[in-house]
Amino acid sequence: MAIKDNVNKLLKEVGERAILEAAAKTREAREIDEAIESGIRVIGENYVSELKKIYPLVKNKAEWHFIGSTKTQKHDLLKKKVLEIVDMIETVDSVDFAFELNKRCRGLSKVMPVLIEVNSAKEVQKSGVYPEDVVDLVKKIAKLSRVKVVGLMTMGPNVDNPEETRPYFRLTKKLFDDIKGMKIENVEMEYLSMGMSDTYRIALEEGANIVRIGTTIFGPRRQR
Ligand SMILES: *Cc1c(COP(=O)(O)O)cnc(C)c1O
């Protein structure tokens, strides 16, 4: 099916419940443009190298979110030119990164909205902070004037049956609500980013208001 048809179908299904973010790794500019022309407002990029290459080639306006590793790509991501085009970083998982980001954004007179990435299934190989460490990290980042926590993001574990992700989405939603209830100054719990092509229906049921979808919009992923 064409990208346009896929987007239309998803937009109809997701409705007002959530923002449909197009996860665009390995996709070409014309594919991203087709998605935006069909109603996508947010593009998610995993790799700084791809973002830098593709951003000038995409003709339509959109919001650009970074959804890749802030550990392995820290150096490239914190470049002035990159921070200028990124509208949100969804994968903040350390106070070190947040401090460095704060410093760089001061020079840009920009406040960067961020989500805290939660390693909800506590998988050793995955990025993100463990659930029990999230509140502490949020409180530390709240003290920074150029970085603003606006919610949480989680990948959930890779499982055969999508239904097995439900407890991890539920746990992340509970954490989201708990932190919201704390009314921490300079923290606005607005976005909960969870769910991908095979799990977005479950994530929506569990309260996601951003779903990040690649394959169901663009088709099978290409090799990088
Ligand atoms: C690739 C990716 C997605 C989308 O995955 P699909 O299964 O292709 O829908 C969502 N979030 C992140 C962080 C990704 O890297």
Image (cartoon, rainbow, N blue to C red):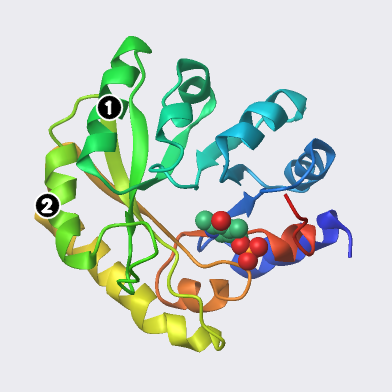
Tell me the kind of residue under disc 1. Glu
Residue, disc 2: 136
Foreground pick, 175 / 131? 131
Tell me the kind of residue under disc 2. Asp
Instruction: Give the SS element for disc 2.
Output: helix
Look at 28% across and 31% down and name the residue there.
147
Look at 48% across and 28% down and name the residue there.
76
Q: Which quadrant of the view contains residue 167?
A: bottom left
Looking at marks 1 and 2 on the same chain, the residue that comes earlier in the sequence is marked by: 1
- Residue 110 pos. (x, y %): 36, 19
Determine whether, in the image, residue 221 is placed left or right of residue 126.
right
Residue, disc 1: 100
Determine whether, in the image, residue 110 is placed left or right of residue 40.
left
Above or below, comparing residue 99 to residue 45 in the picture: above
Q: Quadrant of the N terminus?
A: bottom right
Inspect this view and state whether residue 212 appears. Answer: no
Q: Which quadrant of the view contains residue 149?
A: top left
Locate ligand 1 by image quadrant: bottom right
- Residue 86 pos. (x, y %): 50, 30
Above or below, comparing residue 5 to residue 159 in the picture: above
- Residue 171 pos. (x, y %): 28, 75
Inspect this view and state whether residue 56 appears. Answer: yes
> How many C-alpha atoms fall within 10 Å of the one at disc 1: few (<14), some, or many (≥20)?
few
Look at 35% across and 77% down and name the residue there.
168
